[in-house]
Amino acid sequence: MKTFLGLVLVSVLLRTGASLQCETCIGINKSCNGPQTTCEGGLDACATITSEVTIRGVTGFSVVKSCYAKSHCSSPPPSVDLSEGTTNTKIECTSGAAPPMASILPLAFSGLLLMKLLL
């Protein structure tokens, strides 16, 4: 029983340290760069949303990178009705970056130590 409890605690501690991280930024060009941000619960993908807007022959671009719900990745992007222009939006989703191993090791060590104490 103690072994089972120890394994459960180790897995919970490891899961806590394995949060999804995504680059977050907003740009008025075709790309942007920003910091890696840990995603909140329910946001299980990283998205890059690019938009091209043309009004009266003038074209502008924007990009947003952030945490996103994977369930929305396959949905068509929202459309915007511009009376004198067009808009084209594309959403690309990825699984994001793995957290650095240095952030997981202390949790794994703590879990193993706790398991050893319980045995």
Image (tube, rainbow, N blue to C red):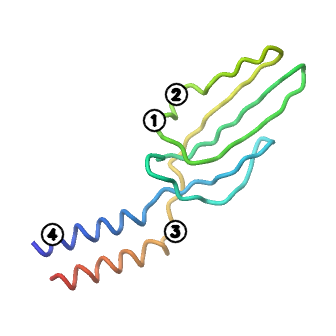
Viewer-nearest of labels 3 and 2? 2
Contact (Cβ within 8 Å) of mark 3 with mark 2? no
**Alpha carbons under labels 3 and 2: distance apart:** 31 Å
Q: Quadrant of residue 57?
A: top right
Direction left: furthest residue: 1
Left or right: residue 5 compared with residue 62? left
The residue where tag 4 is placed is: 4
Q: Position of residue 26 (x, y in %)?
A: 72, 47
Q: Residues within 10 Å of mark 4 (few under 14, many from 20)?
A: few
Contact (Cβ within 8 Å) of mark 4 with mark 2? no
Per the rendering, the mark at residue 71 is 1
The N terminus lies in quadrant: bottom left
**Alpha carbons under labels 1 and 3: distance apart:** 26 Å
Secondary structure at numbered mark 4: helix
Q: Position of residue 4 (x, y in %)?
A: 15, 69
Per the rendering, the mark at residue 100 is 3
**Alpha carbons under labels 4 and 1: distance apart:** 34 Å
**Alpha carbons under labels 4 and 3: distance apart:** 28 Å
